[in-house]
Image (tube, rainbow, N blue to C red):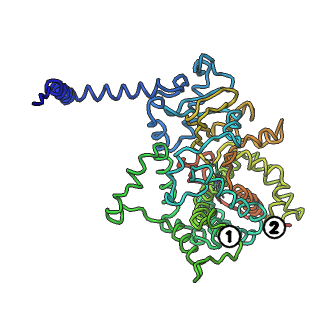
Amino acid sequence: MKVVDTSSSAEKSSLVAQIIAFVTTNFLLVAVLAIVGRCAYKRYASPLRNVPGPWLASVSRLWKVWSTYNGHTELDHIALHKKYGRPQFYPVIDNVIYQGLGPVVRTAPNEISFGTCDAAKDIFAVGKGFHKTMFYSVFPPKHAPDIFTEVRESKHAQMKRYAVVPYSLPQMQKRSEPIENMIKLLMQKLENYATDDKRLCNLGNLLHYFAFDVLGEVAFSRQFGFLEKEIDIEGSIKNIDDVQWYDGIVGHIAEYDILLRNNPLRAYLPKKFQMQPTTMTKIAVAELEKRKQKDGTFDSQGIDLLAELLRNHEGNAEKFSINDVFSIAHGAVFAGSDSTASTMQSFFYLVLNAPKVYERLSQEVKEAHEAGQLSEIVTYAEAQALPYFQACLKEAMRVRPAVGLGIYRRTPPEGVDIGGKHYPGGIEVAVNGWVLHRDKAIFGEDVEEFRPERWFEGDTKLKASHLYQFGGGAHLCIGRNLAIFEMNKTLIQILRKYDITLAHPGRPLQYHSTFFVVQEGLEAYLRKRSDKA
Ligand code: HEM
């Protein structure tokens, strides 16, 4: 007969019972101990334990979430780098006092932010094995990542290869006509305000609508109609900003997205709780559908981005799918509108608040206009020939870059050198243009000041190579040609026609950083300049 020893299993179950009893009667104590233990683990069991930063950031990603929720990550990053850049906070890593590169700050248990251009150069260097972090994966559309949201580097590189030519400057120049038509519409709208120089013009809003409609033209050969109506139709722009705010916040805790916006249970909730496509998404879907032919292929005639991408898809369907075509054309509107609008708003805000700068700039444009050097709609080449304007634009992009959050990368598994120091693999690094553009070693002592003259002093090539407004490296903004082309033509066209006075000089713009810096409150009075040319 088999004898079963029940004593040890009885002991075990009584031990388990005791633990359960202890936990239930001392629930609070156990919870506190668990949280303290977890915090201690996050803070100290990390190769980044000696990097200084806020306590909350060393134990949890809540610091980042909170900062983005509050809408001013760019200011938080500047403040952190100022605070922890002081010698008493220099990090000690492997017994080395890390001061050579200036401030490095811990912004999450597994993330550090670098504050110097030297470090950024290494992080953006091509071929060093940095990867985009999961932050980007949250940005929609989830089922069809575009060039911006794709986090698999090889897939990203493949997509980008097919998109480089359609996005190139020569191709953008071929789209001059629709872009110029949009500029003409903008000028018509401004003219309505200029006829009565006491009529308040919300220049910021008009530029915002304009930037979206230009993208509609460039991507799909059709406007969204914001500028024509001078309203945010169906709240679409606001909706995009809200979505991007969510992306910016939840991107820091990307694994929770599945419980929130991408929760499969939402499909069972009433319609108002489900994700609704924006007007722009509906238009993008309709445009692709319109170009579908009876035999299942697509009509790829035309000069817009969608047509060019469709041509690249032909014969390369396996490497460059129709999903890729759609997501790139659609993504252009999301990546290119708020960013360009924000830059143009910053330009006017900074220039108009600096009377001497405005005077010198107006003079340069006036002289070119009177000398007959500007076409009816300013060309890109003519704009390039105005050095002070170029300096003002660069300086605006330096002081208020249009991306307010960090740019996030993961180090390669084998680790990597950043600024002459080795960092382990698998950590996340961040750089923020607002911080980098305040690197005194590159831009001078007066970095806080809006002073276009700095672009004529010292090593201007070095300064230009450290403007990170468009990011850098393998992920350098693919839409920068369009943005620069559009801004050069539009800004000068406005300056040559109107004398602009801010309605509230000195009043700061209201803004918040979702991913882009979304701005409000650029209100002005316009007066028509005499037309002597
Ligand atoms: C002044 C306007 C613009 C600014 C300031 C800007 C800024 C940026 C920045 C900083 C990045 C890098 C993001 C990162 O690495 O995390 C980026 C990437 C990107 N931008 Fe722009 N952008 C502008 C205009 C545009 C336009 C007009 C388009 C499209 C028509 C566009 C499409 C993209 C795309 C697709 C990427 C992803 C590139 C990649 O990962 O390879 N952007 N942009």
Residue 501, percent across and down? 67, 55
Looking at the image, is mark 2 or mark 1 nearer the viewer? 1
**Picture coordinates of residue 403 (x, y %)?**
61, 47
Figure quadrant of the C terminus? bottom right
Q: Residue furthest right?
A: 371
Task: Reply above or below: 281 against 483.
Answer: below
The residue shown at (57%, 68%) is: 226
Q: Which residue is mark 2?
A: 531
In the image, 439: left or right of 324? right
Residue 315: which disc?
1
CA gap, disc 2 and disc 1:
52 Å
Classify 10 Å Cα crowding around label 2: few (below 14), some (14-19), many (20 and above): few
Furthest toward the bottom, the residue is 294
The quadrant holding residue 262 is: bottom left
Dot 2 amino acid type:
Asp
The mark nearer the N terminus, 2 or 1, is 1
Of 288 and 320, which appears nearest the observer? 320
Please name whichever residue, 27 or 460, is drawn nearer the observer in this view of the structure. 27
Which residue does the image show at 64% across and 69% down from the upper left?
A: 306
Residue pushed farthest top? 95
- Figure check: 38 above or below 373: above
Residue type at numbered disc 1: Gly
Identify the residue at image location x=57%, y=53%.
Answer: 150
